[in-house]
Amino acid sequence: MEEQMGIAIQDTYDERYSWCYGCGRLNEQGLQIKTRWDGDKTVTSYLPRNEHMAIPGFVYGGLIASIIDCHGTASAAMALHRKNGFEPGEGPEPPRFVTASLHIDYLKPTPQNVPLTVIGTIEEIHPKKWRVTVGLYAEDTCCAKGEVIAAVMPKTFMKSDD
């Protein structure tokens, strides 16, 4: 399935910026989520680990927020990269985004030991800001919905090699 959906945007980020707990491919203790296109939506999947438990049988809400947050900012990066004429793995390094606002509604308890599917819908709201609405599903049940306002990462966040 991953091959059919193409390259994850997180796999194209410069190594200097690949340490995020939620999506950094170089953070061995992190979640390492992967965001890909599925048509005009974005998708990621994640299987919560035992340490992501809130109470026996259910996932900790902070994990859900982290997944929605990182999926949202990655979705915005993919959308702007596509708007600039490129898909993940093509063209220049994709833009990076940070969270300007995060809102989560927890709709149902999220079961442990069930793969989670996260689907994002993207809307540009400003040349440097994007709104991503996100649904987090356990099997066919929507357990949480979120909204991420993602802003282009300020240049002051970027390290200089000089």
Image (tube, rainbow, N blue to C red):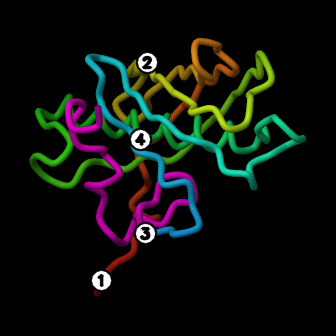
* Cβ atoms at labels 3 and 1 below 8 Å apart: no
| Camera-side mark, 3 or 4 | 3
Disc 1 or 4, which lies upstream in sequence? Answer: 4
Tag 4 residue: 74
Gap in angstroms between the C-alphas marked 4 and 2: 12 Å
Q: How many other residues sit within 10 Å of disc 4, few (<14), some (14-19) or many (≥20)?
A: many
Label 4 secondary element: helix
**Disc marking residue 55:** none
Quadrant of the rendering where the C terminus is positioned: bottom left
Tag 3 residue: 26
Gap in angstroms between the C-alphas marked 3 and 4: 16 Å
Gap in angstroms between the C-alphas marked 3 and 2: 27 Å
Q: How many other residues sit within 10 Å of disc 3, few (<14), some (14-19) or many (≥20)?
A: some
Question: How far across and down, in percent of the image, does residue 141 sit?
Answer: 64, 13
Check disc 2 and give the amino acid type: Thr
Q: Residue furthest right?
A: 55
**Disc marking residue 121:** 2
**Disc marking residue 161:** 1
- The boundaries of the magenta stretch are 1-25
Disc 3 or 2, which lies upstream in sequence? Answer: 3
